Amino acid sequence: MSDENTVALELIEAHFNKIEIGQFEEFDQVITKEMVSEYVLEHGINWPGNYIGTENELLAPPGIVFFRPAVGFGLKEPNPPLTRAGFFTRTDRTFHQPVRVGESIRFRGEITDKYLRRGYYYIVVDWTATGANGALSANGREWHTLGWARHPQD
């Protein structure tokens, strides 16, 4: 195993061991026009295109919503950069109502599982996003690796 992989695994394992099942976080996020513009540019989405509400308000593409909970759980500062370089391995998402640009969204998520499989450390996060009116906008479950390094496979 390379020295770089060994160092990365040590950092990832230390972070993984600090994470507790049942740990949760709540935070509010205003979905700004700037955030949406950056997101659609990065993902090649024609915006506003069909993302106009019934009252001609700008709507955010649904995909912008799901990344926020992942950032809040195990992947954000001050966690080690190597642990934030992981990837989604499975997702289960439901979008219930559109999110308007400029709307404040309340995210709540909980770590519901963590495990080591095929050499990678994983976390599972269940999350909800509610609009300013308290109505459910979206919810989901995300399976995510911590970092890019993996234990060697026999």
Image (tube, grey):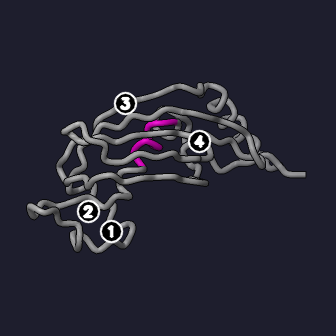
For marks 4 and 3, give the CA distance: 21 Å
In the image, the segment drawn in magenta is 67-73
Q: Residues within 10 Å of mark 1 (few under 14, many from 20)?
A: few
* First reached walking from the N terminus: tag 1 or tag 3: 3
Label disc, if present, on residue 5 of the rendered structure: none
For disc 3, the marked residue is: 26
User: With 150 as the anchor, is 135 left or right in this view?
Assistant: left
For marks 4 and 1, give the CA distance: 26 Å
For marks 4 and 3, give the one nearer the viewer: 3
User: With 131 as the anchor, is 113 left or right in this view?
Assistant: right
Q: Secondary structure at mark 4?
A: helix
Amino acid type of the residue that numbered disc 2 sits on in the rendered structure: Ser
| Secondary structure mostly seen in the magenta stretch | helix
Label disc, if present, on residue 37 of the rendered structure: 2
For disc 4, the marked residue is: 83
Which x, y percent locates residue 89? 61, 54
